[in-house]
Image (cartoon, rainbow, N blue to C red):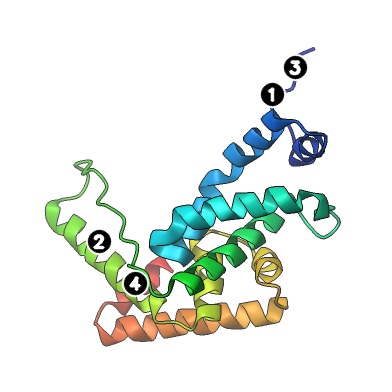
Amino acid sequence: MKPRLTTSDDELLAACRAGDGDAWRRLVERYQDMVFSVARRIAGAAAEDAAQETFLRVFRKLHTYRGDTGKFSSWLYRVAYNVSCDVATARGPVAEYTPAFDAWDGAAGPEEVVASAEYARLARGALASLRPDQRHAVELYYLFHRSYADVAAIMALPAGTVKSHIHRGKRAILAALAARGVARELAEEM
């Protein structure tokens, strides 16, 4: 019989509660990219602080997670979202996160690379102009590929409200982009 290579979140959580430091390390490694991604989108330049605070808060409150209200990943996502909002509010306005250009792979010409980067900049600006509740719902749904149910759980909102935020946010983004003459190209991607 082959040994099982993966351990479920529930098994790791049980081991963490029993004091197993290696299990905690494995949980952090499993979810660090997701937590940092949420933190980067919401807290910007303070993302590292928000991600560290998220894991610290989860470690301290691990005993409160029972699993009956949803998956651990959704609970962790909610904590990351809340902590990132707290950090962003406490720090005030932060510099917008701007990802570096990916290495050119030769598939697109320089004009396409520049146009794509410009579209991305305009889309980020339009997204940033949304009301926070709409922006977070749109980010969770489109950028983090979360379901309506997950977004509703993370934001502690009814599913209908989440759908409304996403619909109105998307409409506002397209209107902002249309004002800049690029909505048609980006609307196809949404």
The answer to whether 4 is drawn above or below residue 58 in the figure is above
Q: Residue at x 50, y 52 (%)?
A: 36
Name the secondary structure under disc 4.
Answer: helix
Question: Is residue 155 shown left or right of residue 133?
Answer: right
Disc 1/disc 3 C-alpha distance (Å): 6 Å
Tag 1 residue: 5
Q: Residues within 10 Å of mark 3 (few under 14, many from 20)?
A: few
- What's the residue type where badge 1 is placed? Leu
- The answer to whether mark 3 and mark 2 are in CB contact below 8 A is no
- The answer to whether mark 1 and mark 2 are in CB contact below 8 A is no
Tag 3 residue: 3
Residue 94 marker: none
Tag 2 residue: 116
Tag 4 residue: 123
Can residue 73 be seen here? The reply is no
Q: Residue at x 50, y 67 (%)?
A: 139
Name the secondary structure under disc 2.
Answer: helix
Q: Residue at x 55, y 59 (%)?
A: 145
- The answer to whether mark 1 and mark 3 are in CB contact below 8 A is yes
Can residue 76 be seen here? The reply is yes
- What's the residue type where badge 3 is placed? Pro
- What's the residue type where badge 2 is placed? Ser
- The answer to whether mark 4 and mark 2 are in CB contact below 8 A is no
Please provide percent x and percent y for residue 2: 75, 14
Name the secondary structure under disc 3.
Answer: loop
Q: Residues within 10 Å of mark 2 (few under 14, many from 20)?
A: some
Disc 4/disc 2 C-alpha distance (Å): 10 Å
Q: Residues within 10 Å of mark 4 (few under 14, many from 20)?
A: some
Disc 3/disc 2 C-alpha distance (Å): 46 Å
Q: Residues within 10 Å of mark 1 (few under 14, many from 20)?
A: few
